[in-house]
Image (spheres, rainbow, N blue to C red):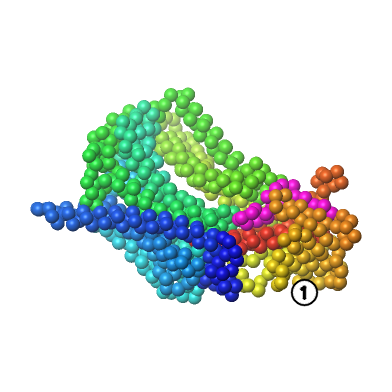
Amino acid sequence: MSGSGFDSTVCTPEQLEISGASEFYCYTRRQNVGLVAVTLAGFLSLAAVVTILGLIARNILRTFKKKGDRPALIQQPMDLFMLSLFFGDLFQSIGVVMDVRWINNGIVQGGDFCTAQGMLQNIGQAAIAMSTFIITLHTFDTIWRRGGIGSRKLAAVIVGTIWTFLVLTVSISTAVHRSPRFYAPTPYWCWINSAYPKYRIAIENFWLWIGFAVSVLYVPLLFWDTGHIIPGDPEWWTFKINTDAHSNHQLPKLKLTLCALAYCLPVLPTSLARWFLFVHDDAKPFATPEAQFIVKGIFSLSGVFDVVAFKVARSGLLLFPSSDNPDETSSVASGNSPPTPEVSLHDDVKSTNSVDNAKPNVPSWRFRLLVCAWVLVNVLDVIWIIYYIRSATEPNPRTAANKSHAGWQAYYLMMYAFGFYWGCVNIVVWMWYFQSKYSPTRTQSGNSVVRSLRKWGSVAVLLPISVIMGLGPFFAPVVGIKLIQQQAWLHRCDLFSGEVVLNGLLFTSPRNAIPVASFYFRQPNGNLEKQYDYGLTQDGTNRSLWHFALLPDSQPLTQIQSVTYDFDNFTFVSTCPGNTSQCSQGSFKDTGVLELSITDPFNSTIAHLRAVDKGWDYGKSDDAPSYILKQVDGDGSLGNVVVRTAVTRPEHCYSLKLCANDADIATLAPVGLTLFRQNEYSKVCSTPNS
């Protein structure tokens, strides 16, 4: 066994050497605990799904005891859709429970068992997303438009297409892609190999995202149920606002909410995680083992959520008895049954003809107040996004948003979650505006040519604005940060004489590779030219010693040869040119505020350096080092900048740029420490995500 305590593993040193660089990964005890929690969630879902399928089988057996006409299991399309959802949950939960083998062995490795787990999880998760997508559209169309899928044959074709697509795609992909294997450790369980990112999107991620996005259709159904919006008839894509109406039936609202939450709650963390890991290369709170276990554990409970939502909100399906009060469930549970008189969509529309041809039935002051509130929230959201982009690309000095790393993660995760839903609100508002402003039934006056020019002129102006306001709250941060980050990478160090590019090791880097710091300095013509490289290596005898030394192909005679760090005693020494004597020595404090004290061989102080802010290296290594290091003056105040971080390279989280004016010991000592931390982050951010 290697290591001690929670960081120990069952692997031998030889196995640890290849862990992560091949289809082989060694768990620590800490990671084993996380995987146990995930597996327990899988067992709960498996128990829930097996129970509901067992009850369905019981219902089938009971029909054989009945005399006369026996009711069929599939009586309406929703029966088929729910069965498809439950079998997706079954496949996924079995795949999660298979983690028991990795827990027992302490090792996850490629092979037939790994492939089987990957296939089951892939098919199950995608089937859940696709089935939920169809169920949501069918429920919305049935209630809103009194439409839906009315044919069981069409429903069978849809469900058959889903499962045929998944089985064939997964089987063919597995058979064709053998080197490397299509399913491999990623690294804590088996899923689609990180070598095939496009397949991850096409087979699964796309359907997770679209299923999550479509779930917002339950929101207008809730407003319809309360009577605050009224669908157009026959123009179902239009609606009117009506604040006078109200609902006397509270239970359907609860059931509609359950239907939405049954998918959104387990999928939201996974959707956000995969979104960040896909497009947000430099902000990866989900790449740490703890985060992946939490996200996977929540997603693994989807079977429990689906079964609870089915029993509470969709009674009357799959031979289960209907609710005692059919008015409470018909619109949610049934795909064919007409709306009851109390909640009839048709009756609601007919009884509000006066509303259909009028402005919203809202007092002018209240309507103006709502518009002002809507505009204010959009302005605040823009400020939220701008502050995020600024704090992400110019993190130093720290702002209120990124003062602590935990607070920073909460800041932008909440921003994206809010942005998704607020974008949906903006889309609805603009849809209402366009359909009410340019409705064919709206009374027109004046010259027709002038009206047309005015109409299309306003559309040309307002349509781009509406698109930006609908998509911007969620996508603007991604686009903005990429553009600003690229500019920061190119120009953040323009006022400095040199730049240092730190390249950490990737998760899959060869074991003989080392992290490297490359120094570039400006020439008289203003161009940057590479001068030398330093590599960071661990001492072969004393594992607490690390050597930051010039590489053999760059050996200027006047340059310091190496800096050796002792992480047990928090000291360092540097070696003079020619590798014959000690140039300087010092101590460092790498927790809280980064601080270095440097002296010459005669203990005379050369430099005293201190960072402007705390938390420069992020203890969990889930973000790149970030600081401004300044000279401490005689009175204790901070003086000139010695070295500072710029940004990580866009799309390459393992590469971090520093700005510096020299390559003396005052610069080299913190650069070596920064490379050590950047190397740790690089391994985390490049870890194949699950």
* Residue placed most toward the observer, 129 or 112: 112
Asked where in the image residue 99 lies, by quadrant, the reply is bottom left
Q: Is residue 30 visible?
A: yes
Residue 527 at x, y = what percent? 78, 62
Is residue 456 at least partly visible in the picture? Answer: no
Residue at left offset 31%, top offset 44%: 313
- Mark 1 lies on a secondary structure that is loop
User: 569 above or below 112?
Assistant: above
**Measured from the top left, where is residue 350 in percent x and y?**
28, 32
Residue to which mark 1 is pinned:
552
Q: Is residue 384 left or right of residue 40?
A: right
Q: How many marks?
A: 1
- Please state if 330 lies on the left or on the right of 605 as rendered: left
In the image, taking residue 521 as reference, residue 214 lies left or right, namely left
Find residue 587 and report its horizontal and vertical position in percent: 79, 57
Q: Tell me the residue at 49%/41% (across/down).
A: 422
Q: With 162 as the anchor, is 212 left or right in this view?
A: right
Residue at 42% x, 61% y: name it.
96
**Towards the viewer: 354 or 28:** 28
Give residue 515's quadrant in the image. bottom right
Does the stretch in magenta take in 609?
yes
**Magenta segment range?**
607-629
Q: What residue is at 50 percent from the left and 52 percent from the top?
A: 272
Disc 1 packing (10 Å; few <14; some 14–19; many ≥20): few
In reply to whether residue 25 is colored magenta, the answer given is no
Given the image, on which type of amino acid does mark 1 rest? Pro
The correct choice, above or below, for 269 with respect to 651 in the image is above
Image location of residue 110, percent across then percent down: 47, 72
Q: Foreground residue, 235 or 258?
A: 258
> Image quadrant for the N terminus?
bottom right
